[in-house]
């Protein structure tokens, strides 16, 4: 399967703990995006990378959220000192960079539950 | 602020008939629009897109219409099939930042 892969699929943790999620994009895609989705809402853009450069991070939800893509391939999203309100589905998507607009292809997400 | 709105949370259509899903947006800087389909426990799947320089794009049973003056987007599915039952999200993009609507749950009745 050469789609977007996210790990883990589910994460349950206690409030105050740090969590890290991984995303492996489609191999030839150089753009990678992170979203959060809560119940009854659409995906909410958080940040995106072009290769290893993080081109937009102002919409990360707080300074507890950070993302990296050190070698321009896989990416990680970390949430420090988790809070109850962080419970959500975290989605990763990737796309090609080109002259024309390119659609994003999503993984199946990591569902985070904060106890 | 919700820059992309889907005002119908749900829609039911008989198999074989046309499904029309609607989406409104507020930001005139959006230049690329997309529709995604989502099944439970899966990520959204790309369906069809349209650039702001066009007013229609067709792909098989799926057609997207864009009315820029009204800031309105619609997805037509014809004929509708039971396998089309899912949540449909519209999305809009400006400067590689994507904004999604809240989704419309489509049920196609056999």
Image: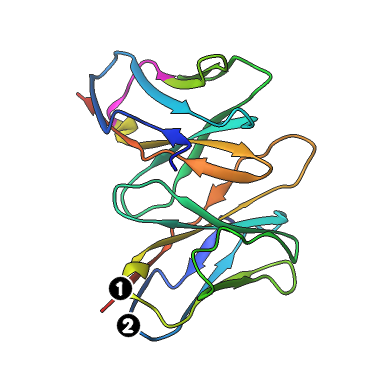
Q: Which residue is mark 2?
A: A15
First in sequence: mark 2 vs mark 1: 2
Q: CA distance from mark 2 to mark 1?
A: 7 Å
Write down the quadrant of residue A102 in the picture.
top right
Q: Are marks 2 and 1 in contact (CB under 8 Å)?
A: yes
Q: Name the side, left or right, on which A41 lies relative to A115.
A: right
Identity of the residue furthest to the front in this view: B1
Quick one: quadrant of the C terminus of chain A? bottom left
Q: Name the side, left or right, on which A92 lies relative to B105.
A: right
The kind of secondary structure element at disc 2 is loop
Is residue A83 shown to the viewer in this render? yes
Q: Which residue is mark 1?
A: A84
The kind of secondary structure element at disc 1 is helix
Is residue A1 shown to the viewer in this render? no
Look at the image and give the residue range highlighted in magenta.
Answer: B76-82
Where residue B77 appears, x then y in whole percent? 40, 20
Q: Is residue B16 above or below residue B81?
A: above
């Amino acid at each position: 399967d050469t789609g977007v892969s996210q790990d883990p699929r589910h994460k349950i943790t206690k409030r105050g703990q740090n969590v890290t999620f991984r995303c492996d994009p489609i191999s030839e895609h150089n753009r990678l995006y992170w979203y959060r989705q809560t119940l009854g809402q659409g995906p909410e853009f958080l940040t995106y990378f072009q290769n290893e450069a993080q081109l937009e991070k102002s919409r990360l939800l707080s300074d507890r959220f950070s993302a990296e893509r050190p070698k321009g391939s896989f990416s990680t999203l970390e949430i420090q000192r988790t809070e109850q309100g962080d419970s959500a589905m975290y989605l990763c998507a990737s796309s090609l960079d080109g002259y024309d607009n390119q659609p994003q292809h999503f993984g199946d997400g990591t569902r985070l539950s904060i106890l | 602020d919700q820059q992309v709105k889907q005002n119908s949370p749900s829609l039911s259509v008989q198999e074989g008939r046309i499904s029309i899903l609607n989406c409104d947006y507020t930001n005139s800087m959006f230049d690329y629009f997309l529709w995604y389909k989502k099944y439970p426990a899966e990520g959204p799947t790309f369906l069809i897109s349209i650039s702001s320089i066009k007013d229609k794009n067709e792909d098989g049973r799926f057609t997207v219409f864009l009315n820029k003056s009204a800031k309105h987007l619609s997805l037509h599915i014809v004929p509708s099939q039971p396998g089309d039952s899912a949540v449909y999200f519209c999305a809009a993009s400006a400067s590689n930042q994507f904004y999604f609507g809240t989704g419309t749950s489509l049920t196609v009745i056999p």
